[in-house]
Amino acid sequence: MVANRRARTYEVEETHDLTEECYRRGWTDGLPVVPPTADRIAEMLDYVGLAPDHVIGEVPVRRRSLTGEQAAANAVMAGCLPAYFPVVLATLEVLFQYDPNCVHHASCTTNCATLGIMVNGPIRHRIGLNCTNDMLSPGNRANSTIGRAVRLMMINVFEQRPGLLDQGCMGSLAKHGVCFGEDEEGSPWSPFHVSRGFKLEDSTVTVATIQDPEMVCNRYGLTAESVMDAVAEVIASHGMATFGHQWIWIVGYWHAQMLSSQGWDRPAMQQYVWERAWRTQAHLKRIGAVIGEAAPEDETIRVYAAGSPEDIFIMAGGGDSGSYSEVIMIYNGVPAITNIINETSG
Amino acid sequence: MAVTPFHDPSVQMRPKVRLVDPTGVGPGIRPLDLAPRPTTLQGARLGLLDNGKKNSDVILHGIARILNEEFELADIFYTRKHSGALPPRPEVLTELHRNADVVITGIGD
């Protein structure tokens, strides 16, 4: 594997249509990209003090390595500002420390798993990360470009291209990139990263291999139990029909207000939802998700959607325009790993 | 004495922009592509790579039986990945290289 090498460069006339040039070279994810000019890349690297030929990580099965220059080029193309690059790098650090081959999990499965990037701490405000209204939608630069930068690296550096190494079947809008911040200020509970042992003033990233987020529209319930029952139902009836996973529950603002005002905290919510998010083994056999004929005793065997209560990760987020939550399944791959974001200003 | 570069006034010079290649392709590293397909399976050594998911073994062995009837395969070598969504471990790939001319892999679920 070649390491510590500089990227090729191409001189193009300034009046040339650089957007089309990037399309012509196959560098995009289908959307236009910011042309990866040398000056923009240098600015990105200078912000974090990273050398262009520094090897961030290697994926042995691809016989490819990711250099600082390549990471910066793809972050530029995604539309990242230099101030976002520490979040991108912290995400990559999680991946390469966990298992370099996990780029496979995060970008090529038939069920179209992708990466979820969840941010806590002061950096959210420094980079203007949306933690509330429409945070999972396009519209905010940081939210829309951080995950996109990693996705472009998957495509360009590791060649996870649809139909070739990316064998996604139906596709997923989440593959454009899922990045958001927890609404720590609106949350009635301690921030997610604090619940994981980090300090309040730490800026952290939590990275997981995820399926598409699924909305929990409970606008009818007047009790915390109603909200939690709805969440348990969504978890247990998830389209993957596989069980024992980890889950992320983004508690929407009004759901959080209701839950906390009725005395519910994180551990109690985890326990309640876990106890109710299951299907019988008989049911799973009848639908074919488990092999075998349903026996009478299978009616009493519960197969839990989450491995344990602690496998339901609870964080606050989303807007206050309605009563919603969001549930995200963590697919096999990167379990939710939280790491410090090292910010270095240039 | 410094030599002044010749400037042809009839040629319009435009400023250039330097684009940096964001891909993993470079000197000595070609784009990834699929291996060439075999021209025949007659007498070939077939490798079966079970991805570890339910029914992969059933389907792969079934396919091998059908192919063997038609092409009189020299050998059928079966092995298994440790994970459905991760690449095979290097030793598994080495074994496949050593024991098979073509490999079928896939899922059964």
Image: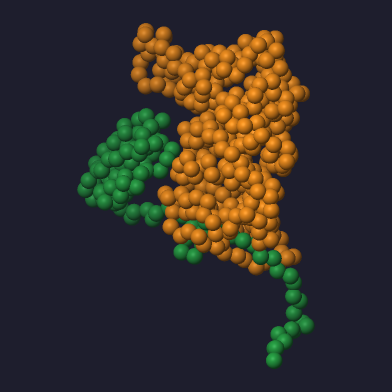
Chain colours: A orange, B green
The foreground one among A193 and A12 is A193
**Which residue sits at x=42%, y=49%?**
A61
Question: On the picture, is A94 further left or further right than A28?
Answer: left
Residue A247, quarter of the rendered image? top right
The foreground one among B20 and B31 is B20
Vertical relation: A269 (above or below) A330: above
Residue B8, quarter of the rendered image? bottom right
Image quadrant for the N terminus of chain A? bottom left
Residue A27, quarter of the rendered image? bottom right
**Which residue sits at x=57%, y=17%?**
A267
**Which residue sits at x=39%, y=11%?**
A298
Q: Where is residue B93 in the image (x, y as percent from the top left)?
A: 33, 47
Question: On the picture, is A110 further left or further right than A229?
Answer: left
Q: Where is residue A242 in the image (x, y as percent from the top left)?
A: 46, 25
Q: Can residue B86 be seen in this view?
A: yes
Q: Residue furthest bottom?
A: B1
The foreground one among B99 and A314 is A314
Vertical relation: A220 (above or below) A86: above
Q: Is residue A103 visible?
A: no
Vertical relation: B3 (above or below) A250: below
